[in-house]
Image (cartoon, rainbow, N blue to C red):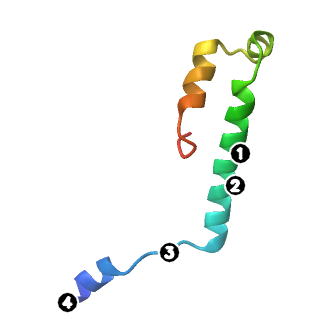
Amino acid sequence: MSARTMAWAEPRTAHPSTWRLLVERWTTRLRERAEMATMTSRERKDAGLNAYDVERECRKPFWRE
């Protein structure tokens, strides 16, 4: 194997704090979307959202903003 191939084959790992921040962000999204799914129409209106916006946001996977 050439040096170029070896560099490509080595797994790249992120710093543990990077992973922790990523997991925290995902957890926050999951929690916020779960709360959003239980909002009443009055709460959605107060937040400036409609049912379509809430449904669309709640259908997103946790890794998407």
Mark 3 or 1, nearer chain start: 3
* Residue 17 point in image, percent of width and height: 67, 69
Q: Amino acid at mark 1?
A: Thr
Q: Quadrant of the N terminus?
A: bottom left
Which quarter of the picture shows residue 55?
top right
Judged from this view, the residue extending furthest toward the left is 1
* Earlier residue among tags 4 and 2: 4
Q: Secondary structure at mark 2?
A: helix
Which residue is label 4 attached to?
A: 1
Sort mark 2 into few (<14), some (14-19) or many (20+) by Cα contacts within 10 Å: few
Which residue in the protein does label 3 denote? 13
Q: Are marks 1 and 2 in contact (CB under 8 Å)?
A: yes
- Residues at discs 4 and 3 in contact (Cβ within 8 Å): no
Q: Contact, CB < 8 Å: mark 3 with mark 2?
A: no
Dot placed on the residue nearer the N-terminal end, 3 or 2: 3
User: How much space separates mark 3 and mark 2, taking CA atoms?
Assistant: 18 Å
Which callout, 1 or 4, points at the residue further toward the start of the chain?
4
Image x and y of residue 21, in percent? 67, 59
Q: Amino acid at mark 2?
A: Glu
Please tell me which residue is depicted at 71% across the width and 27% down the height of the picture.
36
Q: CA distance from mark 3 to mark 1?
A: 23 Å
* Amino acid type of the residue tagged 4 in the rendering: Met
Tag 1 residue? 28
Residues at discs 4 and 2 in contact (Cβ within 8 Å): no
**Distance of mark 4 from mark 2, alpha carbons?**
39 Å
